[in-house]
Amino acid sequence: MKYMLIMRADERAVEAYQDMPFDEVIARMGAYNEQLMKAGVMVGGEGLSEADEGFVVDFDGEEPLVTDGPYGEVKELFNGFWILEVSSKEEAAEWAKRCPLGPGSKLEVRRVTGPEDFPADNEWIRKEEGWREELGTK
């Protein structure tokens, strides 16, 4: 089963990382990624750019509204993610606990849904399965 580890940070964590040498941050995350890859559990993962480079699409009105970042009042920012293929929720939690993050950081761990979570006879589920085969992303 797949789990997504979503990295979240508050202002305290952001300030702490700004005070750390960039090479040290990269080395710590690189070592963690190496452990995940050598264990054969890492499916993917990426960092996210600064929040002010992003934008928000708001669906509250009749038409979606696009606004530039930052996002207004923010208590936590999403900084990146990993997707792991593991045998259990407990294994996902063990890997999450090894992540080299400090105070002010959190990892939200969510199971990634798969075909088994949807009715196999649904038209759109069958179409998506075909598209994934065509794209080689299955």
Image (cartoon, grey):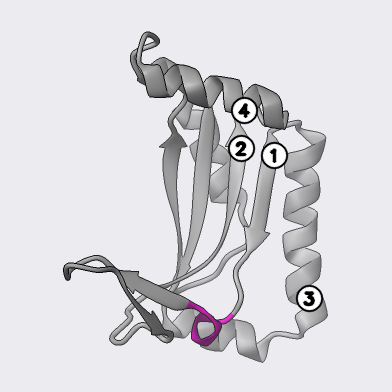
Label 2 or label 1, whichever comes before in sequence order: 1
Please, what is the three-letter code of the amino acid marked with disc 1? Met
Please name the amino acid that badge 3 sits on: Glu
Horizontal side, residue 61 vs residue 18: left or right: left
- Label 3 vs label 2: CA separation? 24 Å
- Mark 3 or 2, nearer chain start: 3
Residue ID for mark 2? 84
Which residue occupies the extreme left position in the image? 61
In-front residue for pair 60/20: 60
Front residue of 66 and 33: 66
The picture quadrant where one finds residue 42 is: top right
Per the image, label 1 sits on a secondary structure element best described as strand
Is residue 111 inside the magenta stretch? no
How far from the left and from the top, in percent, is residue 74? 33, 81
Residue type highlighted by circle 4: Arg
Name the spot of residue 75 as percent of width and height, x first.
32, 79
Counting from the top left corner in percent of width and height, residue 123 is at 38, 17
What residue did someone put label 1 on?
A: 42
Mark toward the viewer: 1 or 4? 4
> SS class of the residue under badge 3?
helix
